[in-house]
Image: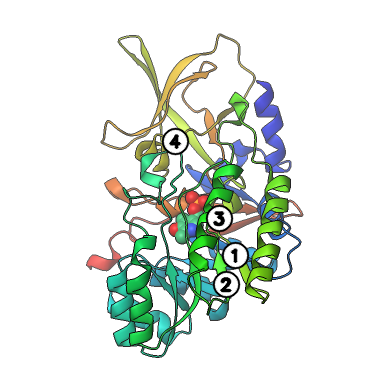
């Protein structure tokens, strides 16, 4: 066993991943409650400024049990669709703790939020007009796009001229005209330009959003958005972001802007993956070993219907091998899935010890955008989810799909 394996076994709090697979089936998402709670607390303790909220972007992981723990930890939530709102309400969030950050939604979806008392943020002048017609005299928030973008892949950068998100500052006069025309109260503004690891970039975004906030005097809150990434390549030495320094800077910005406005505004951050990524490991099984022209392939049950990030974004996930100690040289190995698509891989040319059929792999830091992006492609049942509670006990928090589940809407 290499050292990272030994290290990571702490994650399982004494349980053996091989036994977990035997008990719950393969593949399997395993979560650790302690780590989830710690990540929530990292965020709620980010600043000493008193009017501060952490809105967990629940699209990262919507498991109801995890959402319930987030509520216990004092988090509020961002939802991006009515379905996510239904999940958040089912988990026990109050409507006033939810913020529906919408993109290109229908009038019906706007009405859904209004009827349930969930504040809505729209992100275009045209959607603001639609909302004004639906709910004259109502409250609204707006997502701006100050121009900065950041992220590990172009598909996750959500600021700047190249993305579909947010209202550019040049449209502030049109926005103001519509707010007046429909008697709308602008309660808050928000932005989100992508998840990344640079506190400098995050703070640049804060300044950008505050400069937009100066155009509006009705604001009760300013939402600096997300997201904070996590070090996905810990085995390669990647380090986490320095939240102490970031928090201190944020506190200064919040205090001085509230002073400038002459009232104690509420400030919000929106971590998604930071909350749930590191508390989750995806376990899977090696079913085939082969070489094609010198390229090694380990074929697993970890297709992109189970974990889409690696195929979608070429994301890196650290990998651990469980089982008996093994001898032999590490060599570049492609870890691929069982889906009928050539883009179906978990890792390319990863240096791994010799693998054999029956080995159990742990795909680390898979708690965010893992299950929530999974699908039933190839009519493969989505996996079960199991939670290791703080006291070490195991709780099945979502059962595996059955074959019948996959037919039910068509019968
Ligand atoms: C998804 C999202 C987040 C969180 O992003 P991560 O990549 O999970 O950090 C924050 N805010 C908004 C508006 C989002 O859509």
Could you tell me if residue 290 is visible in this image? yes
Q: Nearer the viewer, mark 2 or mark 3?
A: 3
Q: Which residue is mark 3?
A: 207
Above or below — where is 409 with respect to 317? below
- Answer yes or no: do the residues labelled 2 and 3 have beta carbons within 8 Å? no
Element at label 1 = strand
Distance between the Cα atoms at labels 2 and 3?
15 Å
The residue tagged 2 is 221
Element type at mark 2: strand
Which label's residue is closer to the chain start, 2 or 4?
Answer: 2
Q: Which residue is mark 4?
A: 315
Q: Position of residue 346 (x, y in %)?
A: 42, 32
- Callout 4: few (<14), some (14-19), or many (20+) C-alpha neighbours within 10 Å? some
Residue 365 circle label: none
Q: CA distance from mark 1 to mark 4?
A: 28 Å
Q: Earlier in the sequence, mark 1 or mark 3?
A: 3
Left or right side of 345 for 320? right
Q: Cα distance, mark 1 to mark 3?
A: 14 Å
Q: Spatial distance from mark 1 to mark 2, Cα to Cα? A: 7 Å
Viewer-side residue, 235 vs 208: 208
């Amino acid at each position: 066993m290499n050292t990272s394996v030994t290290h990571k076994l702490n994650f399982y709090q004494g349980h053996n991943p091989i036994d977990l697979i035997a008990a719950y089936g393969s593949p399997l998402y395993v979560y650790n409650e302690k780590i989830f709670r710690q990540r929530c607390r990292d965020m709620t303790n980010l600043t000493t400024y008193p009017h501060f909220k952490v809105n967990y972007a629940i699209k990262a992981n919507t498991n109801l049990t995890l959402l319930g723990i987030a509520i216990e930890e004092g988090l509020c939530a961002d939802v991006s669709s009515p379905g996510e709102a239904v999940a958040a309400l089912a988990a026990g969030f109050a409507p006033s703790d939810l913020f529906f950050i919408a993109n290109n939604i229908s009038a019906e979806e706007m009405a859904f939020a209004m009827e349930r008392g969930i504040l809505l943020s729209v992100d275009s002048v045209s959607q603001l007009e639609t909302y004004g017609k639906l709910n004259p005299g109502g409250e609204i928030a707006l997502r701006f796009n100050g121009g900065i973008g950041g992220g590990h892949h172009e598909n996750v950068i959500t600021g700047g001229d190249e993305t579909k998100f947010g209202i550019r500052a040049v449209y502030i006069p049109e926005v103001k005209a519509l707010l007046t025309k429909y008697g709308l109260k602008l309660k808050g503004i928000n932005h989100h330009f992508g998840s990344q690891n640079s506190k400098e970039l995050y703070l640049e975004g804060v300044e950008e959003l505050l400069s937009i906030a100066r155009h509006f005097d009705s604001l009760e809150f300013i939402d600096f958005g997300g997201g904070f990434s996590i070090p996905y390549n810990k085995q390669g030495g990647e380090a986490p972001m320095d939240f102490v320094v970031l928090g201190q800077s944020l506190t200064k910005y919040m205090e001085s802007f509230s002073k400038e406005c002459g009232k104690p505004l509420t400030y919000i951050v929106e971590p998604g993956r930071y909350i749930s990524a590191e508390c989750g490991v995806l376990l899977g099984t090696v079913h085939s070993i082969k070489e094609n022209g010198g390229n090694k392939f380990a074929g697993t049950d970890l297709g992109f219907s189970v974990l889409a990030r690696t195929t979608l974004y070429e994301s890196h996930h650290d990998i651990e091998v469980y089982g008996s100690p093994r001898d032999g040289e590490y060599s570049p190995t492609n870890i691929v899935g069982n889906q009928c698509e050539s883009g179906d891989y978990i890792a390319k040319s990863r240096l791994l010890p010799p693998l054999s059929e029956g080995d159990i792999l742990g795909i680390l830091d898979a708690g965010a955008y893992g299950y929530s992006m999974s699908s039933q492609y190839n009519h493969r049942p989505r996996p079960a989810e199991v939670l290791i509670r703080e006291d070490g006990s195991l709780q099945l928090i979502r059962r595996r799909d059955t074959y019948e589940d996959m037919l039910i809407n068509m019968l």
